[in-house]
Image: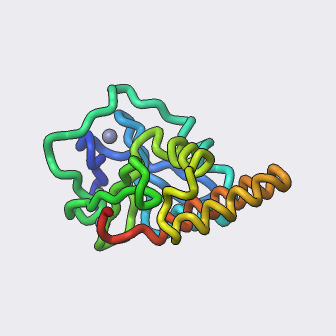
Amino acid sequence: MRERLCPVCGVSLVAQTYLGVTVDVCPTCAGIWFDADELNRLYQMDPLIFPTIEQRYQPVVERYDPPWERLCPVCREPLYQYNYLYTSTIELDGCDRCGGVWVDHGELAKMEQVLRDAKVAELPPEARAQVEIAKAEFEHQERMDKLEFWQGLFTFLRTRPRFPI
Ligand SMILES: [Zn+2]
Ligand SMILES: [Zn+2]
């Protein structure tokens, strides 16, 4: 298998295994590459593992945007940028060919914040419905809320629009 390089830093990603699923973490910027089905598989096994994964790594450099095009670590094709929840300011990078997703360090936490603070009226209908579900569940028991929250989050990741709005 070809070496996987960080789309941001260009250094080799380090494979890390959680619950039998191997993700690729950048030792420099602490971004994480998820292959097409990895977010879904991890979620199904433990919806609460994602904050844990992100908190485990800290970037050793200040976050920056490279002057070069971000390339898929697997296909070496340019990644396309899209906004999480369609209208949020959180930008994720996806690969059209392999379906993988690059998540910069801190973005998982920001995504959680966006869902919690979402001004529902400002969201497009397709996003609003998911947030309403998450919020309704939040008013019930905590564990169930967290499950619903992560379910909503990764539903969006899996159904990301092909073109940023
Ligand atoms: Zn990096
Ligand atoms: Zn790819």
Q: How is the image coloured?
A: rainbow
Q: How many marks?
A: 0
- For the question of whether residue 1 can be seen, the reply is no
Position of residue 142 in the picture relative to residue 55 (left or right): right
Of 16 and 116, which appears nearest the observer? 116
Looking at the picture, tell me which residue is in the foreground, 124 or 159.
Answer: 124
Q: Quadrant of the C terminus?
A: bottom left
* 76 up-or-down from 18: above or below: below
Q: How far across and how far down the image is residue 135, in percent?
A: 70, 56
Ligand 2 image position (quadrant): bottom left
User: Residue pushed farthest right?
Assistant: 141
Residue at 25 percent across and 65 percent down: it is 75
User: Where residue 125 sits: x, y (%)?
Assistant: 52, 70
Residue 2 sits in which quadrant?
Answer: bottom left
Report the residue that reaches farthest toward the left: 67
Q: Left or right of 146: which side holds 139?
A: right
Residue positioned 34% across, 59% down in the render: 82
* Residue closest to the eye, 14 or 28: 28
In the image, farthest residue toward the front: 121
**Residue 67, placed above or below residue 124:** above
Quadrant including the N terminus? bottom left
93 relative to 39 in the view: left or right: left
Residue 100 in view: yes
Q: Position of residue 69 (x, y in %)?
A: 17, 51
Task: Using the image as rendered, state which of residue 27 and residue 151 is in the foreground.
Answer: 151
Q: Where is residue 133 shown, x and y percent of the image?
A: 69, 64
Q: What residue sits 56% from the left and 36% below the top? A: 55
Q: Is residue 77 depicted above or below 66 in this figure?
A: below
Res 78 → quadrant: bottom left
